Amino acid sequence: MKYKCNIVHIKNNEILIRINECAAINQKIFDEYDKPIGKITRVLGPVSHPYALAYMGSKNENTDKIYVRC
């Protein structure tokens, strides 16, 4: 299943996103065309909808819509 992530902040190759509880460290993130663009490096907060810090492969990736698979 594919879940959309809410983008909070982007800086260089790192992106802060709001995720659901099924996302985990080292899980890949995808663009709207199901192309992997990076992976989650840190999960912040023990809540039902935590934040995650993800590292993207390059700065030029399309970051309008980001998804995770669970």
Image (tube, rainbow, N blue to C red):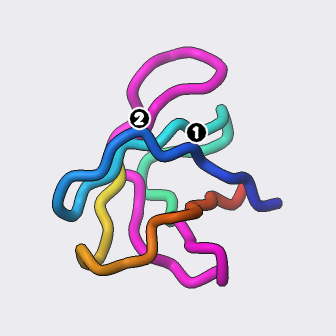
- Which portion, as a residue range, is magenta? 29-52
Expressed as whole percent of the image width and height from the top left, the position of residue 20 reads 65, 36
Residue at 24% from the left image edge and 74% from the top image edge: 59
Q: Please tell me whether residue 45 is drawn above or below residue 10 in the rendered image.
A: above
Image side of residue 36 versus residue 43, left or right: right
Expressed as whole percent of the image width and height from the top left, the position of residue 67 reads 62, 60
Identity, as a three-letter code, of the amino acid under mark 1: Ile
Identity, as a three-letter code, of the amino acid under mark 2: Val
User: Is 37 colored magenta in this rendering?
Assistant: yes
The kind of secondary structure element at disc 2 is: strand
Q: Which residue is mark 1?
A: 19
Image side of residue 41 versus residue 31, left or right: left
Give the distance between the C-alpha atoms of the residues marked 2 and 1, in whole angstroms.
9 Å
Q: Is residue 53 visible?
A: no
Image side of residue 23 versus residue 37, left or right: right
User: Is 41 colored magenta in this rendering?
Assistant: yes
Expressed as whole percent of the image width and height from the top left, the position of residue 3 reads 73, 53
